[in-house]
Amino acid sequence: MPIKGSAYRAEGNTTLRSLCANCGKSIPTEVGHAHPLDEAVEQETWGLVGVLDSKPSVFATCAVCHDAGWRPPAYAGMN
């Protein structure tokens, strides 16, 4: 069983963290679903595409803001 907090994962390395674009909470830079071996770990970070200075940009968003419905300016969701 893998050890949670590996230096190669955001849980064990503070340099692999970002801030939520909405609330400013510290979140892991790993965007996407948890590793299959981490069954108890839920997705904490969502990369949402929006527009910043007329250019498409990815906004790191925490699960709480994502689930509450926050979306970046000119959100471009993909179905």
Image: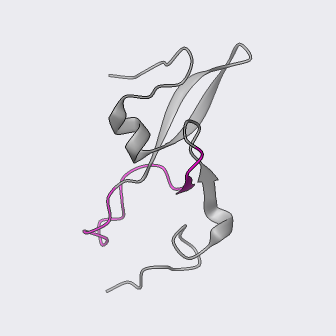
Please, which residue is most extreme toward the right here? 53
In front: 39, or 18? 18
Q: In what quadrant of the picture does the N terminus appear?
A: bottom left
Task: Check if residue 35 falls in the magenta segment.
Answer: yes
Please, which residue is most extreme toward the left here? 39
53 relative to 9 in the view: left or right: right
Q: In what quadrant of the picture does the C terminus appear?
A: top left
Q: Position of residue 25 (x, y in %)?
A: 55, 51
Dominant SS type (magenta)? loop
Indicate the quadrant where residue 58 lies.
Answer: top right
Task: Check if residue 53 falls in the magenta segment.
Answer: no
Indicate the quadrant where residue 4 lies.
Answer: bottom left
Q: Residue at x 31, y 71 (%)?
A: 38
Colour setting: one colour
Q: Position of residue 8 (x, y in %)?
A: 57, 74
Q: Position of residue 53 (x, y in %)?
A: 74, 17
